[in-house]
Image (tube, helix red, strand yellow):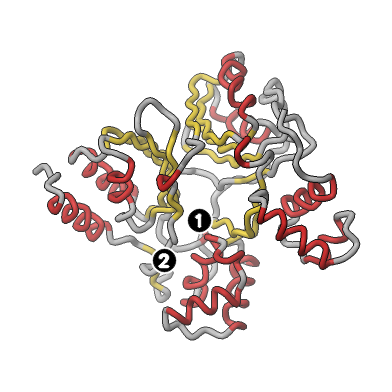
Amino acid sequence: MGKIRISENEKGLLHALGRFPDLSIEELSKYTRYKWSNTVVKKLEELREKCMLFGPFYDLYHDKLCKNPFHKLVCILELAQDYETAISYLTLIEPLWWISPILSHKKVLIAVFYSSDNEEMEALLQLLKDNNILSDYDIRVLHSRKLSECADLSGDPSPSLHNLLDPCDVPDMSLEHHHTSWSECDISVLPYLLLGFKNAKLIEILRQEKKQYRLWTYEQVRYSREKMIENGLIKKSYTFFPFPRRECAEFDLFFKTRDPALIPRILYNFARGGRVHKEYAVSGDWGLISCTSHPLFLTDLMSELDQIEEITEKEVYQTRSLRGNYFVRHFLSFTNFQVETQTLEYPYHLYREKIKEKLESECLIHE
């Protein structure tokens, strides 16, 4: 199952990056069997070329971004039009983070948006439904931080789920609040770090910002990054596949339980220590787990979960292996952030106007 294509030394290097993403090259060499820093640099480049390693990225803890309410939404979208048409409308909504196509007999997408007004965001999706772009939608608001756990490349490719209800020390997933004033430079640099723009190299970010006529100095950009890390707005991370990418299955699992207090425990125990990459969060009375695993783990997943009486509902959405142009990762702009008030409110009326204009130009609008 899943023929290993990387050496034990390379596995050790990936494990170190996954557990300690802030280590310098020199420090990484101490956590691995490589004696020289230049060997570590070379190996990292080789792993990137093999599409085994991605990053660094920076995860956003959105609860600390602004004073006004600010949410992260996971939206399950059933399409009434083809993928290209639906995506062309969804990308008109500025706070889109990413879109992924789902393997289904229907045309289904999962999209993640940030939101300063959940009712306005739902109204936009309803507008798309009313005009036959979407046939249905379901919005799930994250009520916790989303945590991640890198795969153990020596772990079980199809780990048992019999331990889901075992007592455990669940990491703190609670949302916090805005307590640091962010500057214009901070907000300008942030989108590049989230996207991992050119491996999040500050000199590349600086060059790109100069093209936008923002004349920051290198020290300003460096200070902004360090400030955002130290105050908990962002956290550095790397992603690596548990198997060569073509051999992986990617899916999102949503579940409900008889006792909602069990959700964090199940999230934490799920596939823990296995050869599975996972991210997890709480969304109201739903638990959400996003996984990359061997396909056999997904094949047996539903039957395994059926044996756990405490889980009352479950939904699995498998990502299409051939995403093509249907996978979208947006450059998340924060141009509406007001430094003076430390608030971020999106102009939903403008998105509505853009959608209506496009519907009218394509003769699709329904009054």
For disc 2, the marked residue is 334
* In this view, the mark in front (2 or 1): 2
Left or right: residue 12 versus residue 290 is right
Q: Residues within 10 Å of mark 1 (few under 14, many from 20)?
A: many
Residue 38 in percent (x, y) is at 82, 67
Q: CA distance from mark 2 to mark 1?
A: 15 Å
Q: Residue at x 37, y 55 (%)?
A: 116
Q: Nearer the viewer, residue 44 or 195?
A: 44
Image-quadrant location for residue 66: bottom left
User: Which quadrant would residue 61 be assigned to in this image?
Assistant: bottom right
Q: Which residue is more in the foreground, 113 or 17?
A: 17
Quarter the N terminus occupies:
top right
Quarter the C terminus occupies: top left
- Residue at 80% x, 50% y is 10
**Residue 110 location, x and y as percent?**
42, 40
Give the residue drawn at x 63%, y 24%: 296
Residue position marked by numbered label 1 in the rendering: 63
Q: Amino acid at mark 1?
A: Asp
